[in-house]
Image (cartoon, grey):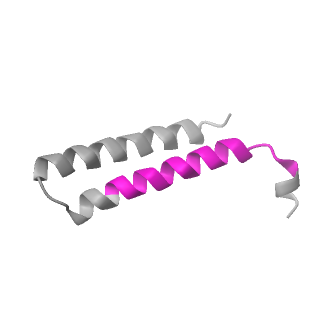
Amino acid sequence: MKLIYPISFVVAVLLIVTGAYLHLQLYASSFWTDLMIGGGILLSFAAFAGALLEGKEHLKSA
C-alpha cells in the first residue's frame, strides 16, 4: 500500500475531528467548520476508494 492513502486518511480524520470540535466550541454553524467536516468526509472517501482501486490493471488501460 502506498503511503499516500494512510496519510490522507489521517488528514481526513483530523479535519473531521477539528471541525467538529470547533463547531461545538462556537455553539453555532460556521462556514469554515462545515467546510472542514465536509472536506474531511470527502477526503476519507477518496482515500478509501484509492486504497480499494489500487492495483486494478483494467482501470489503468482506460
Residue range of the region highlighted in magenta in the rendering: 36-57
Q: Residue at x 82, y 47 (%)?
A: 56
Q: Residue at x 86, y 49 (%)?
A: 57
Q: How many numbered discs?
A: 0
Tell me the quarter of the image containing the C terminus: bottom right
In screen coordinates, is 42 left or right of 31? Answer: right
Q: Which residue is drawn at 22% across and 43% down?
A: 21
In screen coordinates, is 54 left or right of 50? Answer: right
Main SS, magenta residues: helix
Expressed as whole percent of the image width and height from the top left, the position of residue 51 reads 66, 42
Is residue 54 shown in magenta? yes
Tell me the quarter of the image containing the N terminus: top right
Expressed as whole percent of the image width and height from the top left, the position of residue 16 reads 35, 46
Q: Residue at x 88, y 60 (%)?
A: 61
Expressed as whole percent of the image width and height from the top left, the position of residue 13 reads 40, 40
Is residue 49 shown in magenta? yes
Expressed as whole percent of the image width and height from the top left, the position of residue 29 reads 19, 61
Question: 2 or 48, which is in the foreground?
Answer: 48
Question: 50 or 20, which is in the foreground?
Answer: 20
